[in-house]
Image: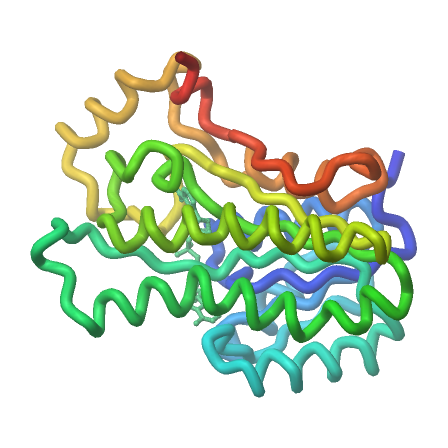
């Protein structure tokens, strides 16, 4: 059964070949959606879009920290696709810093991409969603928000991802009367390029020891959750945070 036939989706930060956004784009396309891949580099975004099965997918340049750029791209996608049903706010960066090492530019970079970007891209689409009385917003938080880091990101990353949880719940409350849903996903340790080459073997072993399912997650594990939250299977789910972490937070 195809869950997204006739639907269109915007996914930010989806050009990274092994990333969560790209895996989500692939699964959405397999389920019949037309997908707009947004990222910082036009060639990479276009290549990722060309990789997807089916017709009409497209890459766009968009730095999500730039509010005007988000507005322009949202309008372009709506004009070209006819409508947008889903946005996955996936673009994110992290930095493995200790509390006292966070400088103003570190704070700005991490808060801006993760949190400000989630707000701006959502704001760019909300009027359209409201007008259609339909829409699903999926925001990528992290287990770091819930347990104060412990894998890779610094405290500013934990704060940004925790901010996303609050923002998601507030959006869900405000948008529910218009039939628009907002949910967050908290991935645990997922093998992608965000940590590639930066984790020592010791760090990796320590992280794996804390995961009851005994393995790192895959990008596909997260994509499956995005598909659920984007599709009508989750029609009565809003304001939730869904853990995709192999059981890391069972307590
Ligand atoms: P990734 O580094 O593979 O991909 C992130 C993408 O975001 C890249 O393509 C990058 O170019 C893009 N990006 C960065 N800044 C941007 C900006 N300003 N505007 C638009 N795009 C921008 O990372 P990933 O592991 O696929 O992570 C995806 C999301 O999942 C991130 O929000 C990350 O914080 C979150 N997450 C990842 C893990 C993990 O273990 N991999 C765990 C929890 C949460």
Which residue occupies 58% across, 44% down?
A: 184
Residue 83: give x, y in percent of width and height. Answer: 86, 70
Of 39 and 139, the residue lying toward us: 139
Compared with residue 248, is residue 112 higher up or lower down, i.e. above or below?
A: below
Q: Which residue lies most toward the left here?
A: 100
On the question of residue 29 being in view, the answer is: no
In the rendered image, which quarter contains the N terminus? top right
Q: Is residue 85 left or right of residue 173?
A: right
Which residue occupies 67% across, 75% down?
A: 124
Residue 195: give x, y in percent of width and height. Answer: 29, 47
Q: Is residue 209 left or right of residue 247?
A: left
On the question of residue 137 being in view, the answer is: yes
Q: Is residue 251 left or right of residue 226?
A: left
Which residue occupies 41% across, 47% down?
A: 162
In the rendered image, which quarter contains the C terminus? top left
Residue 197: give x, y in percent of width and height. Answer: 22, 47
Of 100 and 219, the residue lying toward us: 100
């Amino acid at each position: 059964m195809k869950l997204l036939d006739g639907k269109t989706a915007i996914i930010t930060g989806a050009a990274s070949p092994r990333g969560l956004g790209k895996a989500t784009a692939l699964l959405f396309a397999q389920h019949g959606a037309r997908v707009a891949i947004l990222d910082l580099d036009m060639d990479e975004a276009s290549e990722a879009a060309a990789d997807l099965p089916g017709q009409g997918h497209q890459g766009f340049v968009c730095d999500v920290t730039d509010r005007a750029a988000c507005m322009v791209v949202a309008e372009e996608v709506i004009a070209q696709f006819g409508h947008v049903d889903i946005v996955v706010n996936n673009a994110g960066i992290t930095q493995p810093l200790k509390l006292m090492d966070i400088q103003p530019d570190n704070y700005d970079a991490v808060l801006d991409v993760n949190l400000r970007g989630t707000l701006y891209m959502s704001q760019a689409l909300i009027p359209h969603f409201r007008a259609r009385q339909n829409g699903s917003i999926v925001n990528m938080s992290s287990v770091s928000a819930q347990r104060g880091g412990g894998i890779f990101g610094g405290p500013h990353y934990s704060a940004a991802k925790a901010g996303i949880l609050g923002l998601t719940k507030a959006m869900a409350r405000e948008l529910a009367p218009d039939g628009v849903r907002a949910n967050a996903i908290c991935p645990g340790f997922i093998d992608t390029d965000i940590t590639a080459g930066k984790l020592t073997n010791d760090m990796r072993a320590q992280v794996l020891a804390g995961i009851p399912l005994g393995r790192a997650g895959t990008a596909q594990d997260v994509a499956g959750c995005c598909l659920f939250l984007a599709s009508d299977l989750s029609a009565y789910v809003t304001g939730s945070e869904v853990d995709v972490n192999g059981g890391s937070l069972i307590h």
